[in-house]
Image: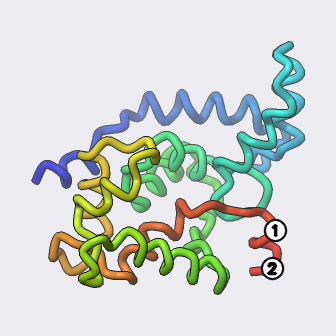
């Protein structure tokens, strides 16, 4: 019950509109997404020598690989444990007139799928064809998650609720977070 409650952490209207204000300061052409150029000029205008960091900013948040950051992508970055439908509702609240951008699950290349499957085998230290929470914790010590967050993550992707991840469930877990190399996306 604990995990379910955590996924519904209340994000207040005020917070969403505050984020919308910030987002709109960057999105100078009101296109509904922040381009690298907009981010660079914002950093320049703020007098911080950060324009070279703009690319990293965009890369880390740009989930669909189109080279810009949408409000949804910003929320996803800030609230990684909030369910997609909840984030989409927040987008709708902030930008009721915006066309709902369809969030396609990220397409992985064959190479990425093969790499993820290889990782699965590597992490599966018990060699039973599944990853349990201990194996996950052991496998991802440097991912910046607490043990509890990893346990929550496992439950989120554990579709058949057997408290372990099958190779397919692990693939879904990795789909959004697996290193996006920009050149893979163009080929995909």
Residue 183 at x, y percent in the picture? 81, 68
Q: For the point 19% across and 54% down, which residue is it?
A: 4
Numbered label tally: 2
Residue 168 at x, y percent in the picture? 39, 83
Numbered circle sitting on residue 187:
2
Q: Is residue 88 left or right of residue 130?
A: right
Residue 118 at x, y percent in the picture? 50, 78
**Closest to the observer: 22 or 58?**
58
**Hey, which residue is sitting farthest top in the picture?**
47
Q: CA distance from mark 1 to mark 2?
A: 7 Å
15 shown above or below 9: above
**Hey, which residue is sitting farthest left in the picture?**
1
Q: Is residue 160 left or right of residue 141?
A: left
**Closest to the observer: 135 or 5?**
135
Residue 70 at x, y percent in the picture? 66, 51
162 shown above or below 135: below
**Closest to the observer: 82 or 137?**
137
What residue sits right under mark 1 in the picture? Answer: 183
Is the residue marked by circle 1 packed among few (<14), some (14-19), or many (20+) residues within 10 Å?
A: few
Image quarter of the N terminus: bottom left
Q: Could you tell me which secondary element the residue under label 1 belongs to?
A: helix
Question: Quarter-wise, where is residue 53 in the image?
Answer: top right
Q: Is residue 7 left or right of residue 86?
A: left
Marks 1/2 in contact by CB < 8 Å: the verdict is yes
**Closest to the observer: 153 or 83?**
153
Q: For the point 63% across and 59% down, which residue is it?
A: 63
Q: For the point 38% across and 44% down, which residue is it?
A: 145
Q: Is residue 122 left or right of residue 156?
A: right
Question: Quarter-wise, where is residue 37 in the image?
Answer: top right
Q: For the point 13% across and 48% down, which residue is it?
A: 2
Numbered circle sitting on residue 15:
none
């Amino acid at each position: 019950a604990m995990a379910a409650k955590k996924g519904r952490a209340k994000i207040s209207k005020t917070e969403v509109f505050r984020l919308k204000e910030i987002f709109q300061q960057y999105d100078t052409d009101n296109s509904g997404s922040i381009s690298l150029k907009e981010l660079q000029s914002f950093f320049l205008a703020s007098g911080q020598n950060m324009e070279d960091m703009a690319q990293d900013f965009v890369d880390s948040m740009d989930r669909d690989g189109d080279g810009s950051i949408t409000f949804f992508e910003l929320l996803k970055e800030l609230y990684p444990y909030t369910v997609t439908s909840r984030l989409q509702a927040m987008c709708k609240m902030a930008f009721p007139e915006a066309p709902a951008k369809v969030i396609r699950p990220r397409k992985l290349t064959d190479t990425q799928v093969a790499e993820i499957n290889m990782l699965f085998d590597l992490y599966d230290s018990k060699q039973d064809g599944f990853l349990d929470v201990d194996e996950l914790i052991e496998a991802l010590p440097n991912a910046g998650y607490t043990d509890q967050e990893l346990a929550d993550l496992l439950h989120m992707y554990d579709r058949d609720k057997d408290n372990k991840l099958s190779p397919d469930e692990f693939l879904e877990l990795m789909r959004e977070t697996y290193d996006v190399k920009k050149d893979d996306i163009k080929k995909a």
